Amino acid sequence: MLEKEYEEEIEAIADETIKSRRKLAAHAVTPDGIIYAINAGAKTIEHGFGMNDECMKLMVQKNVFWCPTIYVNDFVAEGRFKAGSIMNKLFTETEPELFKKAVQYGVKIAYGTDIGGYDWNEPQTKDFEYFIKYGMQPIQAIQTATINAAELLEQNNLIGEIIPGAFADIIAVQEDPLKNIKALQQVKWVMKDGVVYKSIK
């Protein structure tokens, strides 16, 4: 269980965040940390690899999103294991079933990378591959980074979809990502707010 001093710190952070009209994102791994963060007002759980059924039920009940950051965990697991930490290595073994169960429970998933935890030259779309490998349909995986992320940020109808009135933030790739999700690793065309910033033929 969390020690009292840590609980008080979480409460203070949550209170200041909410008073500032910001969303509280909690980097949490263990069940007690996740549950306490949610009850303190967290709107998203980052990482969360140690969550259990109680966590998932509470997340669904309170409409809390999960940002799994699977690739970064796998990226650091072996090195940390050799250095004496077994946690990330253990998570690589449990994450497939955890992810499937979270989807079954109806936990909302928003795309997150924790970029910087792995090399900046690595594609930031690697997590899509895991999502599909662990049971999501390609369109569901892509929606974690579009309409799901927009909902989390309360930017519905502005970002994450191509509709009248939304910001014209669009990318294009050469292949159909619904058939080959790795196509998203090679963005050929970028429009931001209606202005083309990158165009490769």
Image (spheres, rainbow, N blue to C red):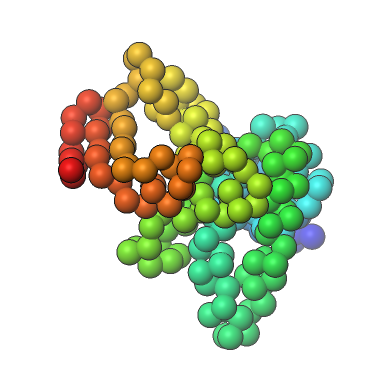
Q: Is 39 situated left or right of 13 in this image?
A: right
Q: Is 183 situated left or right of 79 in this image?
A: left
Residue 68 vs 168, above or below: the answer is below
Residue 191 vs 87, above or below: the answer is above
Comparing 125 with 180, the one in front is 180
Residue at 70% from the left image edge and 41% from the top image edge: 103
Residue at the limit of the structure toward the right, as seen here:
54
- Which quadrant is home to the C terminus? top left
Residue at 79% from the left image edge and 60% from the top image edge: 1
Residue at 61% from the left image edge and 81% from the top image edge: 81
In this view of the protein, can residue 61 be seen by the observer?
A: yes
Q: Is 40 situated left or right of 190 in this image?
A: right
Residue 99 vs 140, above or below: the answer is below
Residue at the limit of the structure toward the top, as seen here:
164
Q: Position of residue 179 (x, y in %)?
A: 48, 43
Q: Is 11 situated left or right of 197 in this image?
A: right
Residue at 37% from the left image edge and 52% from the top image edge: 185
In this view of the protein, can residue 153 be seen by the observer?
A: no
Number of numbered callouts drawn: 0
Q: Position of residue 187 (x, y in %)?
A: 30, 46
